Amino acid sequence: MTRVFWHMGQALLPEHFYAQEESLRAEASLRFSLLPEPSWGLGWLAFDEFLLSKGVLSIRELSLVFESGTVVDVPGNAAPMVLDLTAVGKTRTPVYVHLDSGFDIVETRPGDPGEEGIQRILQRVRLSAEASSAEQTFRLAEAVCDADGTWAFSDEYVPPLVRVRRGLVFDAVLGRMEALVNQLRHALREELQENHLSGETHVLAKQALRSLFEFQALLVDLDGQVPPHPYALFCALRRLYIDACVLRNVQELDALGRPYDHEDLAGSFNGLLDPLERLVARGRPDVPYREFTRAEGVYFCDIEKNVKRARDVYLLVQKPHVAAKLDLSKVKLASPKRLFLVHERALTGVPVKRIERPPFAQSLSSTVEIFALERGQEWDYAVSEGRIVLFDVPALEGCRLYLYSFVE
C-alpha cells in the first residue's frame, strides 16, 4: 500500500505506474473493508431472460465488486459472458463468475478524441458451473431446470449485493416483504380502530405502525436514485419484527439470535420473514369487550355467548379526557322492552357499581372508568332478549361505552 516516491529527473518506467496503481487499489480496498457495511457484491445484472429459459445464460451487463475490492464491469472493463447450462448435465447448478489473473489488450476505438493509439486492459472474466482455482471467484446465482425443461434462477439463493434493486435475483424476497407490509398494515390499523381501551396496546401498535412505515419507505427507495444497502433493509425489517413481537407479547425472539450474513442474504431475510408471517397469520387475540352503538338517543349492545358465560360483566366508560368528571346516577341499564318501564316506574334497572381496582384495570387506558354490573332479574331480562340498552344522557357526552366480560 506504500506509494511510489516521485522525484525530479527520475526515469519513468511502466513498473512505476503499475506500482502506483496497486498502492491506490490497496488503499481503496482497505478503506472500504473498514466500513461497517460490506461494500462488495453484485450491483447490477442484465441478461437475456429468453435465452436463460432455454438453458443459455448470456450476460450483457454486469457490475460486480469482488470481496478483494476488484471491480468488474461488463462491458466497461470486461467482455460479455455466456454459459450453456444444458451442457452441465445437472438440473440444478450454481453459477460462478471467475476472474482470471491474465488480461487481454484492446485498442481504443478509432475516432476517440485524445486517445488514439492507447491500448486498454480488458479483464478476463468467465462464467462457470464449477468453483475453480481462479484468482477471484463470485457465486452469482443458482440455476434450476423444471420438469418441462425451462431454466430459471432459484429463489433460494441471493448473492451478496452492494445495493438492493428489483431484478437482482431478489424479487421473490421483495414479493414476500410487500405482501407482509400489506397484511401487517391492515392488522395494525384494525388493532388501533377496535382496541380503544388499552392505552399500552395503543402505544405499542402505533410504534409498530411507525416501524412499518419506515420499512415501507425503504421499499419505495428501491425504485429511486438511492437504493438501500441490504443491511439497512435488514435492520428495518428486524426493528419491525421486534415491535410486532412486543405488541403480541412474544417472549422468545428466536430470530434475533441470527445476525446479518452478507453471503446468505436469502437466509438472513427469511429468518425474519418466516416468524413475522406466522405472527400475522395468527392474528390478534379477541378483545374481551364490545362497544355500545348509539342510535336515536339510545345506546345498545348485543349480549353474546361469551358475555353470558363470563364470571363478571362490567360497563366501561371511556371519557374524552382523564380529568373529565363522570356521574352515572341518572343512567339506567335495562333490556330493550323494559327500558321505558324502568324509567316510568323509577326502577333501578341493572345495578351498576363503580370499581376502583378490578383485576384487569392495568391493561386499560387512564381515561376509562369501570362499573360492575350486578346480576339479577333485570340482567336476566336483558340476557333473554340478547341486548342491553340505556338512554343517551348529557353525562355521557363525548364518552364511549363498552360491555366487558371477565373470564379468569
Image: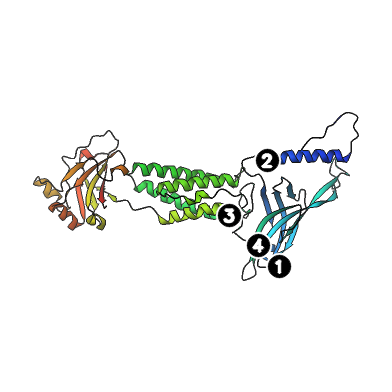
Kindly report the distance in space between the C-alpha atoms of the residues bearing marks 1 and 2: 38 Å
Q: Point out the tag, 1 or 4, that comes first from the N-terminus.
A: 1
- On the image, the x and y values in percent for residue 185 come to 45, 49
Q: Point out the tag, 2 or 4, that comes first from the N-terminus.
A: 2
- On the image, the x and y values in percent for residue 406 come to 26, 51
Q: Do the residues bearing badges 1 and 4 touch, measured as CB atoms within 8 Å?
A: no
Residue at image location 24% in from the left, 51% down from the top: 301
Residue at image location 41% in from the left, 45% down from the top: 205
- In front: label 2 or label 4: 2
How packed mark 3 is, by other alpha carbons closer than 10 Å (few <14, some 14-19, many 20 or more), is some
Which label belongs to residue 32?
A: 2
Q: Do the residues bearing badges 3 and 1 touch, measured as CB atoms within 8 Å?
A: no
Kindly report the distance in space between the C-alpha atoms of the residues bearing marks 2 and 4: 31 Å
Q: Point out the tag, 3 or 1, that comes first from the N-terminus.
A: 1
Q: Which residue is mark 3?
A: 266
Q: Which residue is mark 1?
A: 86
Q: Which residue is mark 4?
A: 143
Residue type highlighted by circle 2 = Phe
Q: Do the residues bearing badges 2 and 4 touch, measured as CB atoms within 8 Å?
A: no
- In front: label 3 or label 1: 3
Pick the residue in front: 7 or 354. 7
Residue type highlighted by circle 4 = Ala
Kindly report the distance in space between the C-alpha atoms of the residues bearing marks 3 and 1: 26 Å
How packed mark 2 is, by other alpha carbons closer than 10 Å (few <14, some 14-19, many 20 or more), is some
Side of 159 where 27 appears, left or right: right
- In front: label 1 or label 2: 2
> Is residue 101 shown to the viewer in this render?
yes
